[in-house]
Image: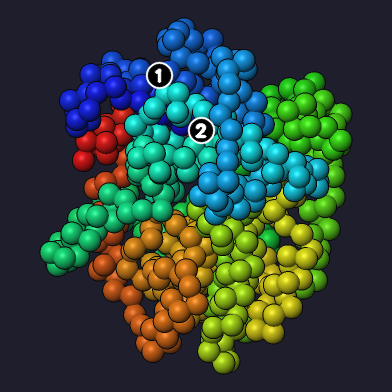
Amino acid sequence: MTVIYCVNTPGDWGDRAMVKAIYSGFGEIFWLYLAKHLAKNNGWEPVYWVGVPQAKDVVRRDFPEAIFHSVFDAIKGLPAGEYISRAIKPIDTRIITDYAASQLILLRMMDRIDALGSFGYNDRVRLLHKQMTYWQTVLDDLKPDVVVFNVIPHLIFDYMLYEYCKPRGIKTIMFESIPVRGMTIVMDDFMGPTHINKLYAKLLEGNQFDSVPLSEGMEEFLYGLQGSYFDAPEYVRRVYKEKPYEGLRSPSKSIFQKLIDVKRYRDYFEKQRRIWLSRFRPPPNYLKQRHKKLENSKMNWLQYKKFRLGSHLKMRKLIRHYHRLAGEVDFDHPYIYVALSFQPERTTSPMGSFYVDQNLMVDLLSKTVPAGWHIYVKDHPFGFSPSKFHRAQSGRSKVFYDDLASKPNVSLVPMPINSYDLIDGAQAVAAVTGTVGWEALFRGKPVLLFGYPWYRGCEGTFRIDTVESCVDAIDIIRTGYRIEHRKLRLFAHALEQTAISASVEPHLRIEAISDEEAAARLAEGIQELVTS
């Protein structure tokens, strides 16, 4: 979801009588509650709403003046109905030059539209220019002051919005769900400091280590990060559930436990419902079909099934290729463990910036580690999960794995080796983003970060963006660097003090609260950020 606010009066946020808002990506009812909460209590008036088509009637019922734009049309570069006949402003050399770096990120972000090589360079440039012309027109028409995203923008059109906000002085707000106690971070820029970073720096400066109060739930969560793999939090272990590997199976439940597991029955019937519906129509998607323009692409049931079958065949070949290249891990020699992120996903695009090409990260490490050190690279298990094949098909290739394995001090790691063992034996862990870095910190291992995860700035993390920063970080680590555990607890304390206990992503929720309560908590977080 994206929210754009256009304020008509100057002054502080608290003094403004009306805030014009655009909501985008409406997928859950609590976002409508959020908009109504902000409209009633803070005077935020929606003028533009990008959401799933099913939300159109609901949004127009509560906000009849708002322009509604299907999120699928927005991704494809199609305008909202009210903008079909409106003049769209052109882009010129100055704009193209100013956004050259953003264009590279956007072109790679379009992997999510590709269906088995259907979305080539010329088609991507065409979509890029359509997005650039359209959204500058919308912003210039509405003259917004702030844009709020429910997650870090990564659907092409919303990332273009994010980039356009910077030179216009438009404030941005976004949410990032984290798997720590079902919390959500409210931030104004995924690349900048968060409330957590600011409070953490203040606590460090005040040397407040003697008493670091953590909730019972947080203590339990952190304990799971430091114990055995089978004691790890659920989000760590669930990646192996669909295809459990040898040595990673969780203890099986008894027959009685299975019989009384209500959630198991609910999940089963929900799965059967989805299967039944899928027999008659493909799920909503924005995939590009071969020999068709993107805006005209609309797969029928048979075409979508053919695409899914092709994706499965491709990914199974890639998995076999990966395993042919993978070798054993020598835990007795120094190494850096590189945990690759699943792609295409926001964790690398845009959160990795140019390190969305994770080969660049491995290449930099390979050429800067000391003699005798090795680089062990393990792909993300989600890419090897049958339910993810249709998404992973555009994120990997044989060439990608070949390039990694061709480096003399780099080896691919067999998938059955769990991440905790790889972390424990490493001198350091490297990643673009991902919770593997958070896990490594609490297992006493420093982390080389090439992207912008929520825990950046925590004790034990090293930001890597140049050859020099990589060399310096490795030099510090090799000379006996040790993580101070008390500083990790201080960061966890700052997290609990600043994050919101209301997840914007259903699969990360752990607290049974109503949609109205979740919306109220998120609205308070927004208001606190814009007035701070």
Q: CA distance from mark 1 to mark 2?
A: 19 Å
Q: Nearer the viewer, mark 1 or mark 2?
A: 2
For image coordinates 21% across by 40% down, the residue present is: 532
Horizontal and vertical percent for residue 260?
54, 34
Q: Quadrant of residue 248?
A: bottom right
Q: Where residue 136 is drawn, which disc sits there?
A: 2
Residue 37 can be seen, yes or no: no
Helix, strand or loop at label 1? It is strand
Mark 2 element type:
helix
Q: Is residue 346 above or below residue 356?
A: above
The disc, 1 or 2, on the residue closer to the chain's N-terminal end is 1
Q: Is residue 97 left or right of residue 522?
A: right
For residue 7, the mark is: none
Depth check: 211 or 12 in front?
12
- Nearest the eye: 418 or 195: 195
Identity, as a three-letter code, of the amino acid under mark 1: Pro
Mark 1 surroundings within 10 Å by alpha-carbon count, few (fewer than 14), some (14 through 19), many (20 or more): many
Residue drawn at point x = 59 percent, y = 58 percent: 356
* Position of residue 4 measured from the top left corner of the image (x, y, whole percent): 41, 29
Q: Dot 2, crowdedness within 10 Å: few (<14), some or many (≥20)?
A: some
What residue is at 68 percent from the left and 61 percent from the top?
245
Residue at horizontal 57 percent and vertical 69 percent from the top: 361
Residue 447 picture location, percent across and down: 44, 70
Instruction: Decide: is 389 above or below 1.
Output: below
Residue 398 quadrant: bottom right
In the rendered image, the vertical position of residue 227 relative to residue 67, given as above or below: below
Left or right of residue 291: residue 133:
left
Is residue 411 visible to the viewer in this orientation of the structure?
yes
Type of amino acid under label 2: Gln
| Res. 46 mark | 1
Q: Does 78 sit above or below residue 320?
A: above
x and y percentages locating residue 171 in the rendered image:
34, 38
